[in-house]
Structure formats: structure tokens, C-alpha cells
Amino acid sequence: MAALKALIFDVDGTLAETERDGHRPAFNQAFADAGLDWQWSEERYGELLEVSGGKERILAFVQQSQPNFVLPVQFADLTAFIKHLHATKTTYYKQYAAAGKIPLRPGVERLLNEAREKGVRLAIATTTTPANVQALLENTLGTQSLDWFDVIAAGDMVPQKKPAPDIFEYALAHLQLPPENCLGFEDTNNGLRSATQTGLKTVVTVNDYTRQQDFSQAALVISDFGEPNVPFKVISGQVGDARYFDIELARALCEAYE
Ligand code: XBP
């Protein structure tokens, strides 16, 4: 039986509902600043979320639906223009986080603190830009919270983005732990595939953008981590008589590792 030694968290959609409340409005603000009439509705953004990575998502959007796009003269090429748009978007995202517009999902703060109390290590494996992770954590859990995580694997730190396993492999390598001693947390099929390819047993917390996706490879699928007075809903998997996700349940899932 494998002892639980670390929890590895995705960020967007898992720690917080960042896509709908943070990234999407930030993209739209950056497009407006650049004089573009591009506006991503909640629905359109849901479709574009198939593509991991903000820069990659803008490129996919241009290729899919902007055949008449004309590159502004001051940019050498489309890549340079997308980089500029994405940097502006990141600035807005950080402002939204600083304004408290991106709260953590239910149970996240409680679970992180319980893990720290019980000596379970913490790590992050996300596609988003490192500055966004910092802004989210600092403005929800405080500046010190960055030190809670032994590893923050993010963005372009790895060559390939989810569903490739690179970012979880990076996190495991820097934790110096085998997957059987860890538990992954994700909210998307792309993320689940990224995590499970490394051998990580993975828990999925669904959200409005992802609840219809395929999570058949997940160890457990729940509505969110829940709280003692606001229980989670179990969508698939075994939780015994647990009413919210805690370290005891994490240990049980990890020890059941095949
Ligand atoms: C989700 C992503 C990210 C964000 C946008 O990341 O695909 O690209 O949507 O962030 P996660 P950037 O792995 O945490 O689910 O614009 O910084 O890429």
C-alpha cells in the first residue's frame, strides 16, 4: 500500500473558477485594448478551452474564425502579436485577482491547510502563466502561501501543454516522488489525461465548463471538495461515509493505488 506523501493540484477550474471569471474577461479586455472586435462569450470560450494555453488558444481562434485578420504593421509576425495580446491579458488577469474577483473554490483552503498540518506536501501542475498562479495565491491565501508549495510547475516551463504529461512529470521529478505516493487533482479531460499518463491517481472536481467531459479514468469525480456544512456531491467513485474531501479520504484513495 502506497503512503500518501503529496497532493498535486491543477489551478484553473480546480483551485478557482478562473476561466469564466478571470481569463475570459481578461482576454476580451486585451482584445479591446488592441482595437480588435473579438469578444469571447462564455459559450465560445467553453469551446476554445479545448486548446490548452492562452497563446495557443488565441492562435486557434485566429486560425478557426479570423480568415481576414490583418497583422498590425508594428508586429513582425502573428506570434509576436499574440505574445503582446497575451501579456496584456495577463496584466488584466492579475488585476482581477488583486481586486478579489477570483475566489477559491469550496474546500480548497481547508484542504490545503489540513495537508500542511498533517505533513502532506503540496505541488501545482498548471498550464497557466506562473504570474497568474502567484496572483491567485497571493490574493486568496496571502503572500506566504507561495511557500506552501514545494513545486509550482506552470506554463512554458515544459515543452508540451496538457493533455501531454509534461507538467505533471515536471512536478513529480521536482518532488522526487513516484506517482504512487501522490494524488492529482484536475477539472478537465485534458488535465486528467495529462496526470494519468504519469501514473498519477487523479481526483476530478467538475465545473460548468467541464461536467460533460469524459472522466472515466478518474479515481473519483466530485462536484467540489465540499465543506463540513456543505457536503460535496459524488459523481463517480467510492468515498465511504465522507461528506467532503479531506486528507483521510486522500490517504484511502492513495493506499488503494493498484
Ligand atoms: C488552463 C489553461 C490556461 C488558462 C489560461 O490551465 O489552459 O491556459 O486557460 O492561462 P490549467 P494562460 O492547466 O491550470 O487547467 O493564458 O496563462 O495560458
Image: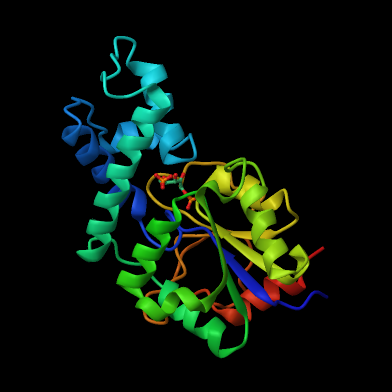
Residue 204 falls left or right of residue 3: left
**In the depicted view, which residue is nearer to us: 107 or 232?**
107
Q: For the point 65% across and 66% down, which residue is it?
A: 183
Above or below, 141 relative to 92: below
Above or below, 3 relative to 182: below
Residue 239 falls left or right of residue 188: right
Number of marks in the image?
0
Residue 190 falls left or right of residue 181: left
Q: For the point 76% across and 78% down, which residue is it?
A: 3
**Residue 23 image point, x, y percent:** 32, 47
Q: For the point 34% across and 10% down, which residue is it?
A: 67
Residue 149 falls left or right of residue 145: right
Residue 148 is at least partly visible in this image: yes
Outermost top residue = 68
**In the depicted view, which residue is nearer to us: 115 or 255?**
115
**Residue 129 image point, x, y percent:** 44, 51
- Which part of the image, by quadrant, shows the C terminus? bottom right
Quarter of the rendering containing residue 104: bottom left
Above or below, 229 relative to 154: below
Q: For the point 54% across and 85% down, which residue is it?
A: 116
**Residue 220 image point, x, y percent:** 61, 60
Outermost bottom residue = 117
Residue 105 is at least partly visible in this image: no
**Residue 87 image point, x, y percent:** 33, 43
